[in-house]
Amino acid sequence: MDGTSSKKFSPHHCIAKLLSLDKHIQSITQVALSRRLSPYLRTSTFNPIPVPPYTVAYESVAPTVEDVQAAIRENIGVADSNDEYETVVKDTTKRVKTPAVYDAELNAHCGCSLLAYHLKHPRIVPLRYIGVSKSLCFACQTFFTLYNQHARAFGQAPFCFKAANWKLYPRWVFLHFGADDTCIPKPVTDLLDKVRTDMIATIKIWLQVYVREKSRERVVSDSTAASRELPTVGIRQAEEAKHAEALTKVAASLGW
């Protein structure tokens, strides 16, 4: 841990990143040497363009202290004029964990940033591949699946992607172009609005299925678990809570 950050240094994480970089390079090399692409690459001239990440200002969707206090006031059942009222509110608020406040910009994942660049520069004809070296996360996979499903109806072409690793990133960024982005045609914004609507519906189904399955598993665990199994059950419940929270935050980033 350094003096400017509260984040702990993780050697294991750094080594894993280095190893994954090697895998990405191998994946790109394999694609370049494939039967489909190698003839095209050998006979083409390329002008590499560095694409900056698509960024948005961070907007916290987590409840504030005021939100927590308002919820407490609705449920404590104590008259407003009672001195005990504020004491209960303050004591209860202290026991509620509130998330940290971030004041920063968030970067979209590389596949989404690359798509944003292509949508802003329609005259450039790109290769129809996104995420060749790296599997897409849960949100990116859902986004590109729905984008490809509706792209042709809005005058756009779909993009191929390698696979999905189903990882969840709570601070995932959805592509959204404002009114000041005059280079973005209306069919593109309509397409992204359609994808966003379908993503919300898809994630709602995922959450419903996930909660239903985990509820059934918990019923079985509660009825059969012995005392020696309780620590494992507790760890699994904590992991499930993190997973459900991440799904909810991805949905919240879509404005649901």
Image (cartoon, rainbow, N blue to C red):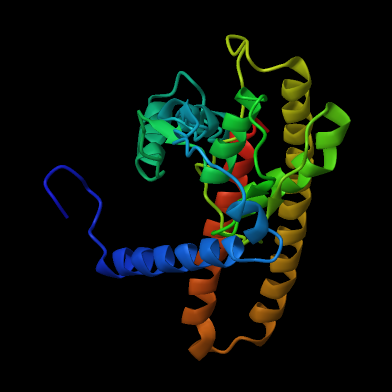
- 205 on left or right of 153: left
Which of these two is toward me, 146 or 59? 146
Tell me if residue 137 can be seen.
no
Q: Which residue is painted at 57% across and 64% down in the image?
A: 240
- In percent of width and height, residue 190 lies at 78, 22
Specify the farthest residue to the right.
153
- In percent of width and height, residue 46 lies at 53, 41
Q: Is residue 127 above or below residue 82?
A: below
Q: Which residue is painted at 66% across and 44% down in the image?
A: 127
Q: Is residue 136 above or below residue 64?
A: below
- In percent of width and height, residue 241 lies at 55, 59
Question: For the N terminus, which image quadrant?
Answer: bottom left
- 132 on left or right of 207: left
Question: For the C terminus, which image quadrant?
Answer: top right
How many numbered dots are placed on residues in this image?
0
Q: Is residue 115 above or below residue 221?
A: above
- 54 on left or right of 210: left
Tell me if residue 32 can be seen.
yes
Which of these two is toward me, 172 or 52? 52
Q: Which residue is painted at 58% across and 9% down in the image?
A: 180
| Residue 174 in which image quadrant | top right
Which of these two is toward me, 109 or 89? 109
| Residue 90 in which image quadrant | top left
Specify the farthest residue to the front.
43
- In percent of width and height, residue 130 lies at 63, 48
